[in-house]
Image (cartoon, helix red, strand yellow):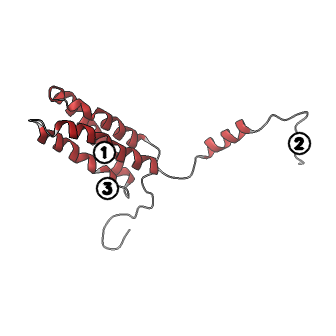
Amino acid sequence: MRAGTGRPETRTRVGRLQRVLAAGALAASVPGLLYGVHSYYGGFFVLTVLPLTLPPLLGRFPRVFAQACVVIALALLAWSVVGAQIAMYVFLPSAALLLLAAAARPAGPPSVRGVSSSRAAARPPTRGRPTRRAP
């Protein structure tokens, strides 16, 4: 625990792919925001984009990052369906990118199973008798 905070110290961070997908969700919402901000319902478009700024700020907390991505993506998905009459469906790609960011594998060492199977697949076949190890 860190002194005085009451929180356990987290050494893992959000992976690069997760950060890129979350930032991509924010970037994908900009054309929709520019499309709708000049309409009568411009305030709804601005309020829809505001929660998308939260996940990129949660880079030090992977679990909270994933939870925020899922909650914001599901709310955005529901809001896109409900607000289809005023073109809120332009935010569907942002919801999809946030769900992908939550599902992406966080940073860390590659799994042993994946590395060993890829090495075995890349190994050329042996010719003749395989060598035996001495007991």
Tell me where residue 60 appears, x and y as whole percent: 38, 58
- For disc 2, the marked residue is 132
**Looking at the image, residue 56 lies above or below residue 84:** below
Cα gap from disc 2 to disc 1, whole angstroms: 57 Å
Kindly identify the amino acid type of the residue bearing the numbered disc 2: Arg
Say whether disc 3 or disc 1 marks the residue closer to the N-terminus.
1
User: Pointer 2 and pointer 3: residues touching (CB < 8 Å)?
Assistant: no
**Looking at the image, residue 77 lies above or below residue 104:** above
Tell me where residue 109 appears, x and y as whole percent: 56, 52
- For disc 1, the marked residue is 26
Choose mark 2 or mark 3, whichever is in front.
Answer: 3
Say whether disc 2 or disc 1 marks the residue closer to the N-terminus.
1
Numbered disc 3: secondary structure: helix
Numbered disc 1: secondary structure: helix
Say whether disc 2 or disc 3 marks the residue closer to the N-terminus.
3
- For disc 3, the marked residue is 57
Nearer the observer, 31 or 7: 31
